[in-house]
Each structure stands twice: as C-alpha cells, then as structure tokens.
Image (tube, rainbow, N blue to C red):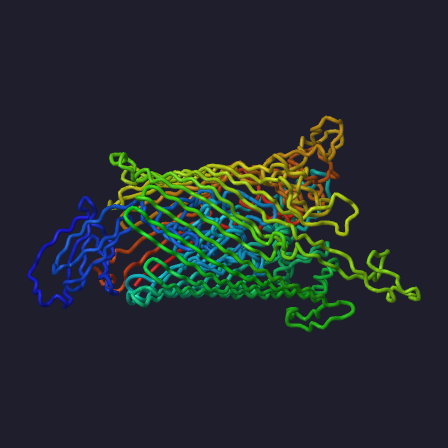
Amino acid sequence: MEVSLNLKDTNINDAAVAQPISGKVTDGTGAPLPGATVVVKGTTKGTTTDADGKFVIDADANSLLEISFVGYAAKEVAVNGQSSLVVQLDQDLSQLNEVVVVGYGTQKRSDITGAISSINSESFNKGVVTNPGELLQGKLAGVSIAANSGEPGAAQDIIIRGIGSLRSGTQPLYVVDGFLLDNSSTGVPTNPLNFINPNDIESIDVLKDASATAVYGSRASNGVVVITTKKGKGKPQINFAASTAVSSMANPMNVFSADDFRRQVVAVGGTLQDFGANTNWQDELTQRGVSNTLNLSMSGASTENFSYFASVGYQDQEGILKNSRLKRYSGKLNMNQKAFNGRLNIDYNLTASHTENLRPDITSTMSDMLSLNPTVAPYTDGQPTLLNTNALNPLARYNLFSDRAISNRILANISPSIEIIDGLTYKLNFGVDYSGTNRNQQYKPFPAVINESDIANGVLDNAISANTNQLVENTLTYNWNQDVHNVTLLAGHSFQKFLDETRITTYRGFANNNIEPIYQDHTSTTLFPTAVNADAIKNELQSFFGRVNYVYDNKYMFTGTFRADGSSKFGENNKYGYFPSFALGWNISNEDFMDKSFFNNLKLRASWGRTGNQEIPSKITKASYLEQRLQTGAGSVSTYPIDTDATSLEGFPYGIIYTRLANPDLQWEVSTQVDLGLDFAFFNSRVNGTLDYFNKKSSNILLEVVPSDPVEPTSTYWNNIPNMIIQNNGVELTLNYSSDAKRDFSYSIGGNLTYIQNKVQNSPYSVLATGAAQGSGQSGATINGYINNESLGAFYMYQFDGINPDNGQNLFRDTNGDGQVLDNDRLVVGSAIPKIIYGYNLNLKYKTFDLGLNFNGVAGNKIFNHTTMTLFNRSQLAKSNNTTDFAVQYPDEALTNANIVSTRYLENGSFLRLNNATLSYNLPLAGSKLGDVFKRISLNLTGQNLFVITDYSGFDPEVNTGSASGGIQTFGIDRFTYPRARTFLLGLNVTF
C-alpha cells in the first residue's frame, strides 16, 4: 500500500476536534475502487467510496481510518492531521489470511492442514431456499447434495466423500455457532434443518478429512458441516429483503392423452371405459405455487466492546401440489460483549422458529395423477366425480385429507470466555436445542368410498413429539508465539444429553358433519377403539479431547488431535471410543527458492485419522423382554399352563420372552481416512484451486443380523460384522479464475469435480438388501443392496432380455447357464451412487449489473423407476388405467405378464442441471438524494431449475423415495416422487 499525503492548513491545537477528511481509494495501478468501506477505528462512523473511489468522513487529527474492499487486503491509515488522503490497496485474491472455522476454534486458511471447503453468503445458491443444504448444492468438491423430492423443505441426502456406514444414513454432523445438533427427526418427514433461516447464515465450512473432523470424534464419520450465522460489525445498518416467486411443474410426465388412450386400450385388447371427457390429471392436480419471503435485520457494533445482529424472517412457500405448503416465522439474535480490556468475551446466540407444514397424500396423489382414466371428467355438477370403482377422486381427497404439523424450535447457547493470562483462554459453551411438534393426519368421513374403511368412517392420527438436546463444554486454549514459532494447544471436555419423546394416538369413526375429526368427539368405542403408542429415548455422550497446532516460520505445519467419546448407546465393555488424527502441511510458496516463482500460493497437505459412528438405535446393548398372553388364534409360546385347575386362557399367567439379548461387547464403527492435498494459486492469484486424494475405510460395521443357529431366544441380534470394510476413495478438484475486478466488465468462472470409487469388502453376506419393492405382488423383492466386492448401492436384479414371442412373458438372462432362471441368476447391474459429482459457475459483472449462473450434475449412476414398474404396464392399460408408451413398447407382451424387479425398469441417472441463474441490478446511489438515505438498493431476478439434460424418463433424476429394507438406508429408487418445480423469483434488497 502507498499513502500520498496532501498536507493542508491544520491547527495542531484542534487535533481532538472532528473535521472533514476527504480521500480517494485506488488499486495498485491507481484505478479507483468504488464501494470500498472507510471506518473511523473505534467508532461507528463509516462511509463508502463513490464511483470515482472518493470519500468524505469526519474524523479528528489523531484518528485511524480502517479501509477495506472485497478482494483486497484491508489497511489502517493514520490521519496525522491531514485533510486529504490517497490510499492504495493491494490485491489479496488468494485470501490466505481468511479465517476458517474449525472444531472449537478458527485458523488462518494458510495454516490449515486438513481438507476444509468453505463458502460465504455471497456465493450461496439463490432463489427460494428453505435450508442450508440448498445453499451448497453443486458448490463444493466432495459434497453430494440431492433432494429426495420436490416437496417444499424436502429431506436431503448429503454425502461427504461417500457412504461409510450401513445404518447411519448419510447425514454429517451439523454445528451451528458452536452447538452440535442432533440429527434425529423432529416429527415431520422433511428436512430437520428447515428451522434455520438461510438469510441469517454468514458462512458454511465443510470439514471433510479425518484431521479436520476427528476433534468431533464419534459423530464425524460422515463429515462435519459448520454453520456460522451473521454477527454485528461496523457501522449500524438495517437490511430489508423481500421476494415473490412463482413455481410450476418443471417436467410433466408424458402419459397418454385422452385420444391416444382410447386407441391404445383397444389396441392391447382391453375393455375401454370411455366417459367422454378429455382430462389432463397432471394439470388438475397441480398448481402454480406462489412463495413470498420477507427478511429484516439490524446489525452493528455500537462500541469496540459490543456488537449485535438481530433479524426476523417470514417465508411462505407453496408447493406445486395442492395442499402443499411450508410456512416459517424465524427470529435471530446474536450478541457479543467484551470487558476488562477485551479479556472477557461473551457470545450469545439465539435462533427461534415457528414452522407450519401442510402436506398432501403424496403417494396416492402421484399414483392418481399418472394413472387415472383421462376420459373421466374431474367434476360432475360442480362436485368431484365419484369414480366408477367407488375409489376416491383425488380432487375430493384434497378436501378430505390433511396432514398438518406445527413445530416450534429454539436453539440458544451462551459462550463466555476469559483470558486468564496472556495466551491462555478458558471458554464455557452452554446451550440447549428444544423442538416440539404437533402433527395431525386426518380424513373426514366420506361414506361414498365403501372399499376403504378409514376414508369411509374418518380417521385421525395425532402425533406429539418433543426433542431436547443439552450441551455443556469446557475448553482451555493456549496460544504461544515467539519468533518463527506459533503453537496453539486445545484441551476440552464435552457433555451432551438427548431426550426424544413421542406419543401417537389414532382415532377412527367420526360423524359425517363436515367438521374436521380433530375437532370432534374422540371417545374410544368398541367398534372403533382408540390406539395409543408412546416412547421416550434418552442418551448421553461424554467426551474428552485435545489438539495441538504448530507452525514453524509460516512454512511447516503439524496438527495432532485426539478425542475419547463415551456413549450410553454402547455396553459396559466398550463404552468409550478413541479417535486420533495427525496432519502435516508445507507452505512451499514461502520457501526462499520460490521467491521468483509464478506461484502466489503452493501448499502441500497430508493427513491420517480416525472418526467414529454412534448413530445406532438406543439400548441395543441391553436385554429387553416382552410380556405376552394368547388372546385368540393358534398356540402361544409365551403362555404357560402352570395352574392345573385353570379352565381357560385367562387362568394362565403371562409369559416372559426375550425380544433383545444383552451385548456389552458391541463396539463402535470406525472410519479411517488418509488425505493428500495440494492448494495452489498463480497468475497474481487470479487462478486458484485445490486438488485432494482421499481413501476412507469404515470397519467394525454395525448391523442387526439373523443368528446362524436356528435355536436362539431372539430372531435377530446386533453385532459388529467381522472384517467387513466399506471403502471410498477418490479425487477432488476445485479450480477458479477471476478477472480484474476493477474494470467495468469483469468475470469469474469456477468449478469442482469429484471422482469416487467405492466398494464393499469381506462381507460374509451374499447381499445385504437395502431397497425393497412395494405393491401387490412386489413387496419385499430386493432392488439394491450391499454386495461383496461391489459398489455401494448396487442394483441386484434379473437382466431383462425382452419378451418371449411364444407366450408374451418376460425373458430374463440365464447367467449361470443351468438352463433355468432362478434367484441365483440375478446380477449387479449398476449402482445408485454417482461416480462423478460436479458443479461449475459463471459470474459476469458490467458496471451495476451482475449475472450469475450455477450448474450441477452427476454421472455414472442408475435409477430404478419403481413408478414405471407399478403403473406403466400393459395390464393396467387394459383395465382403462392410463400409462405411458412404455406399456406398449412390446406388441407381443401378454396382459398376464408380471412386473418383476429387473433391468427393464433401470435407467441412466446422469444429469446436468442449470440449478439457478440470477440477474441483479444495483442502483447507482452515489451523488443522488437516495444515496443520503440508502447504502444499497438491489433488484434481482432468479430462475431455479431452468433446465435438466438427462435420459431419465421420470419427473426428475435427482430422487430417492425408495423403501428401506431392514433399517438400512436405500438410494436411487423413484416411487411416486413429488415432482420438481421450475421457479422464477423477483427480489428486492435494501440496506440503509
């Protein structure tokens, strides 16, 4: 930085009197930097530079001015009695001094030895966004994010560097402002992170390798997502954001029109039921969803010792199915107070939300939408037409059925810290996360439907759930710096307690008076008895952890971490798990021999570590019993005729049987990971990126298994599968380029690519089924699973070879050549897990206009189209149910041909999506009257899911709505999935 001082007439005796200071901020070439921030240090006085890089601010002669601009190193400039300044800022595109949030602390990016990807609010995905996962999709290497459906706030599969467990799903550990969340359900099958207002998030750091995650120990095997919300800083300001969006079905299914339907039913030899109408049920059962969002925040630092951020938010998102809605009211308060010359520091974080979920009967609606006879009129005499089978018209279902859940959640933590002596700081982190949900699913009575009792008589399921998560952490941190040595030591203790409570009450049989069942009499009757199910689960986790970071001469780095976790989920003999990690780093670009190198940054990283997994059912290491007595039916093993004088079953005592055996030796699952990484930047840091190789192996795999000995007191038991390994290895590449930001036209382009290979090794099972088929004649048939020496999520089924022209039945391949097709002819025919995950972005800026495009995609995976297998077949068409041309692709196929799980329904799942595109216009305020009131006014137009390039025939290739088998999570199955929407949003952002 160069500072040119233009000395004007100055009265030294007036040094403490504020006077106007004018100046100009430029880059290294002397070009002006408009929008740079200028603040009088230690005060709330601040301003920004105009289009010519000029500013005027009141300051006394002894003041310091803090000057900053995005992409440039911030500087402090002393006024020293001057009245005019020219300040030159140096470019800092590499952002090596960027602070990254790691476990229980922060580090400079240049000192990081682990694999950590970071993203700030400026780079988040734009549009109608409900939860943090949607902000990240396609943005970070090694992080796969896929929505399970197009429902507002739908659950997501978030996979960091591959799947490492059978049962725990894919979810990483989430840490919000230092508080470790519990991933348990909140009572609604949507995303449990919907309570966080994305507008309140400042940055997200994703910890990927074991060196970065091991400090979190037992819950870090799937990676860690650290969410940091906005804090107060600088001059007080108010931000207001409002948006309105319209959504519609992005890709309707190509079912037969009424005219095509009439021809095709006759062509296949079916009986045409023609009711004379021409109905598009996809149009009838969907809508244009309107979404509105309002956010208001206030932030600032009134003094050096106090800062604040407060916000309120409102989001009302309509889905494209009727009676589909997510409404959220949120509040956020973050405060920081310092005292005793900064030695005492208190952080307070509060998040509160009230969420209302309205959900339709998705499975039934989607089935009707695709298969109902298109010649049936939707309405007759103004009322939904009663279908000839006495089945329920889905338009009537919208009026009869409702699934409404109201959730309230509070996340609050307070973190006081005190610097006991120079460099030694003690910190307490105390917090609680409480959520309560009341969910009511109900059908009003509709006697016209005589073949479904719950609909005819009415039904109400009331579910009340409450989750409490309490956290207490104590840490000591010591920082020691001397000459070329920099040491940071961390030691800590953590105790976390969880309590999940649920009560579900089912009532049946209500008066047909158009009053919702929830408001009717709930008295249990003999004909319709009330059923009540309740449970409570309590778990505790105690941890001891430590970490050492050592940096020598800003060149050589070492990180060592150790954590011991004790969980109430495990038995007495293996209560604790132990998780170490080590990492080395070498800042090659800081070596003397690199002085003339074109590299601005070149760092080599290597790490090894272990993390754990405790996401298993509670109490499985303890014995459990069941008390039974035969009431009706055949003989019972749990009723004992001890009383010889007894003349009926009521005279026999209850029998006690095992339902679960004690297993105090059950061990933790362990994930061991090696990472080699390279960070680089060159061409004056305009090009920067990272390259990582990782190898992750999970062992001690936990599974509920069937005993090999048929004489056992229980049908299953929990065990660690000996020698079984789940392996993921791959390569991650991130590459970005930025042009000269000071020009009228500038641009940046970037992308990431992840290639993953995965395999199950040493499994003693021929197949561990994950996804299973559902429906008449299909239930329980294996679709995919874990198979030895095969990829995760392997599809295991018959190879379809067409239709036998002699009998019109399926032809399946005889793979073992024994002359018959049996179960042992099934093959691994692909995987649901993509081999390649990628995303790229292009950002263009011309004066006050900005255009951002974000793409994401996957390759190398398959999707099993369960919807097609269930609905789109020849026999359904012959019964006057609608289908697609899939049902008629084989003219010789018999109407009696069965729907059997096979490659006939397996499709390519690769896709490329334009995730979002945003065009923004920033009003030029400098020199105008508006500029005296507003700091920034921006208008933006955003399109989401604008197009998808794919061969998949369903609504969308990003899908996972299969049925899990044996509690093992499934992937890549599409069964009656809620369609994805295409959305256009118009937004306004104002800062004043």
- What residue is rendered at 41% in x and 56% in y? 228
Q: Quadrant of the C terminus?
A: bottom left
Of residues 237 and 584, the one drawn nearer to the viewer in this rendering: 584
Q: How many marks?
A: 0
Of residues 165 and 660, the one drawn nearer to the viewer in this rendering: 660
Q: Residue 333: horizontal and vertical position, in percent?
A: 40, 66
Q: Quadrant of residue 797?
A: top right
Asked if residue 363 is positioned above or below residue 677 in the image, the reply reads below
Of residues 262 and 981, the one drawn nearer to the viewer in this rendering: 981
Q: Residue 989: horizontal and vertical position, in percent?
A: 35, 59
Q: Quadrant of residue 879?
A: top right
Q: Is residue 132 visible?
A: yes
Q: Residue 902: horizontal and vertical position, in percent?
A: 67, 37
Asked if residue 704 is positioned above or below residue 824 in the image, the reply reads below
Asked if residue 694 is positioned above or below residue 15 in the image, the reply reads above
Residue at the left extreme of this rendering: 9
Q: Residue 416: horizontal and vertical position, in percent?
A: 40, 65
Q: Is residue 979 visible?
A: no
Looking at the image, residue 749 sits to the left or right of residue 167; the answer is left
Looking at the image, residue 617 sits to the left or right of residue 808; the answer is left
Of residues 827 and 294, the one drawn nearer to the viewer in this rendering: 827
Asked if residue 474 is positioned above or below residue 222 in the image, the reply reads below
